[in-house]
Image (spheres, helix red, strand yellow):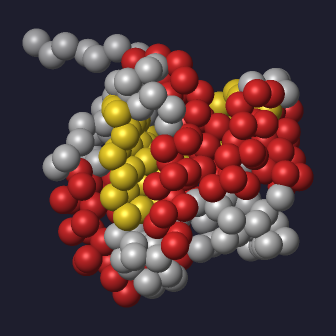
């Protein structure tokens, strides 16, 4: 089990059910990590959107959110909202993806999310990434499923401004949605910042982590 030491992250894995999940849920954290560690190896897997305009949006967005990174993005073609009935396929795809990477940190949605695709992917992750630190990002939406995340990642004012700008630049298909606006993204980051004792932050739910140094046996 890897400890929570962000400064030691050399490889980052980003997992999502849909295009835009990662930048909305963890875009500020990803920006911060990539800017702090040029050449960071980033591997992203998105289960739906392949062959649609959403795929092009996602590839451009992740390139912008991962400046200077060694980035590879895989977008698959699962129908939106159907992960429970595509469970075996999703497990196989996740296992195949796992063989291509050895991350220090995995970012994915969390188990308490009301959207079935987000929730089921989060449940699959510990069955595939068995010895890895996995954190679940939160996505604000109409469903009343926001829970208090125990982990808070501080964000600078600059990073929050850039996150909002990049979301609007790279997801034109979403900008007409009532919830897709600066107040939404900045508002949640401000709430999490208050809870973290800073101006802005992103919240994460912990899957599991080891505290302290490894103990030698014998």
Q: Check the picture and name the quadrant holding the C terminus.
A: top left
Q: Residue at x 61, y 65 (%)?
A: 113
Q: Nearer the viewer, residue 119 or 75?
A: 75
Q: Nearer the viewer, residue 138 or 101?
A: 101
Residue 151 occupies quadrant: top right
Image location (x, y in percent) of residue 143: 74, 73
Image location (x, y in percent) of residue 115: 59, 74
Image label count:
0
Residue 131 occupies quadrant: top left
Whether residue 121 is visible: no
Q: Quick check: 201 left or right of 204?
A: right
Residue 212 occupies quadrant: top left
Image location (x, y in percent) of residue 15: 43, 54
Q: Considering only vertical position in the picture, is 59 above or below 191?
A: below
Q: Check the picture and name the quadrant holding the N terminus.
A: top left
Q: Residue at x 25, y 66 (%)?
A: 93
Q: Residue at x 60, y 50 (%)?
A: 23
Image location (x, y in percent) of residue 41: 34, 32
Q: Residue at x 39, y 73 (%)?
A: 50
């Amino acid at each position: 089990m890897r400890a929570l030491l962000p400064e030691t992250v050399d490889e980052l894995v980003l997992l999502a059910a849909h295009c835009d999940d990662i930048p909305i849920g963890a875009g500020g954290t990803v920006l911060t990590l990539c800017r702090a560690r040029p050449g960071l190896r980033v591997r992203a897997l998105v289960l739906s959107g392949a062959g649609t305009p959403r795929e092009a949006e996602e590839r451009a967005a992740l390139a912008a959110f991962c400046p200077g990174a060694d980035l590879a993005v895989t977008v698959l073609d699962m129908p939106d909202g159907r992960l429970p009935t595509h469970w075996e396929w999703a497990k196989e795809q996740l296992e195949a993806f796992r063989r291509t990477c050895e991350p220090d940190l995995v970012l994915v949605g969390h188990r308490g999310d009301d959207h079935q695709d987000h929730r089921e992917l989060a449940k699959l992750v510990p069955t595939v990434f068995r010895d890895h630190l996995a954190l679940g990002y939160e996505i604000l939406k109409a469903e009343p499923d926001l829970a208090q995340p125990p982990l808070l990642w501080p964000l600078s004012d600059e990073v929050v401004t850039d996150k909002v700008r990049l979301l609007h630049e790279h997801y034109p298909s979403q900008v007409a949605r009532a919830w897709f606006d600066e107040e939404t993204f900045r508002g949640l980051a401000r709430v999490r910042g208050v809870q973290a004792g800073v101006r802005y932050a992103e919240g994460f739910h912990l899957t599991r982590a080891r505290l302290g140094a490894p103990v030698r046996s014998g």
